[in-house]
Amino acid sequence: MSRAAAIRRVGLVILGVNFVLMATKAAVWYTTGSLAVGSEAVNSLADAVYSAVVLGGLYLTTQPPDFEHPHGHERIEPFVSLVIAIGIFVAGVLILVQAASSVVNGTVSPPAGPFAIVVLSGAAVIKFGLYRYCLDVGSRYHSPAVTAAALDNRNDILTASAALVGVVGASIGFPILDPLAAGLVSIGILYTGIEIVRDNVAYLVGAAPPEELRIEILRRALAHPQVSGAHEVIAHYVGPEIDVSLHIEVEGDLTLMEAHDIETAVVNAIRDISQVDDVFVHIDPKELGEWKEDEETNRLLRRFDD
């Protein structure tokens, strides 16, 4: 399956599942009045809303390159992730305010009954399956938006479990556990929003990729038998993809055709890394002495040798 088709399918699955969960939890909340179940219904409502936004965003990110976007539209994905984070923050704040108000005012919900327990337990199981599905697709296709959705679903497992504790506590005579559980749900929701923002800032500000990937870039450049050195190796995120530039040193008496073949081989070797988009290689004749002291490259070389 192509990256575009896989990512779009994720959007549709998330939207459908969250809509069903939202409707089910809202029905239980309406009939029982449980604040913990109500907080979970709000959480699922936020999930359903952002799922629709994500679906639209993922449709844009999977469009082919055009004249105005010659490198494609994947760089929109971090912004889709931030939309997810905004929805998560809004839901978390609303639930926290409602839970705090309930505790301060002394208003607690009546026991929710066994149906609420079944719904919340089922929601946790469903969210675990959705989390694993999104995490697998996000990792396989290096999609920050789908990975953000996976983190939100992981958080939903915890929040559903917290709500379940509140419902069970209220059922056995401790109704205060219901708003306390709702408050815990809100904290988990807010933490997930922070986590998504933190993970996507690197894509937006052009941060360097993980060190292991930079070592792999250097290893592939130096693997060519006619490359005797490398320096000024720069790799940085452009959206979820990585652009690489580097200088390689070769024998100065090579013909232009031979140097071109070396450059092409090095570019192709690095571009075969799935996260890499563009590779720019500058060739230096080693006899000219243009090599520059590069502490970062030397450090990566030492890691590579180890």
Image (tube, rainbow, N blue to C red):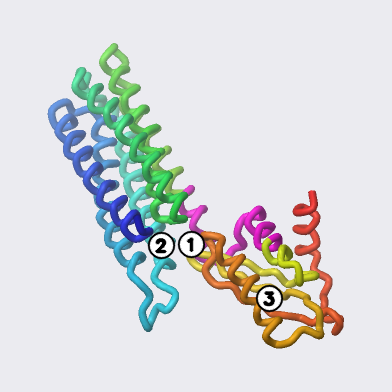
Circle 3: is it few (<14), some (14-19), or many (20+) Cα within 10 Å?
Answer: many
Circle 2: is it few (<14), some (14-19), or many (20+) Cα within 10 Å?
Answer: many
Q: Which quarter of the picture shows residue 53?
A: bottom left
Q: Nearer the viewer, mark 2 or mark 3?
A: 3
User: From what the image shows, is residue 181 above or below residue 46?
Assistant: above
- Could you tell me the amino acid type at mark 2? Glu
Residue at label 1?
Answer: 240
- Could you tell me the amino acid type at mark 1? Pro
CA distance for labels 2 and 3 = 34 Å
- Could you tell me the amino acid type at mark 3? Ile
Q: Position of residue 111 (x, y in %)?
A: 22, 19
Q: Position of residue 89 (x, y in %)?
A: 38, 49
Residue 262 disc label: 3
| Of 92 and 212, the residue lying toward us | 212
Mark 2 or mark 3: which comes first in sequence?
2
Mark 1 or mark 3: which comes first in sequence?
1
Q: Secondary structure at mark 1?
A: loop
The residue sitting at 38% across, 48% down in the picture is 149
The residue sitting at 27% across, 28% down in the picture is 122
Q: Which quarter of the picture shows residue 120?
A: top left
Q: Position of residue 114 (x, y in %)?
A: 21, 18
Q: Secondary structure at mark 2?
A: helix
Residue at label 2?
Answer: 77
Q: Secondary structure at mark 3?
A: helix
User: From what the image shows, is residue 60 above or below residue 34?
Assistant: below
Decide: marks 2, 1 in contact (CB < 8 A)? yes
Segment colored magenta: 195-219
Question: Magenta segment, principal secondary structure?
Answer: helix
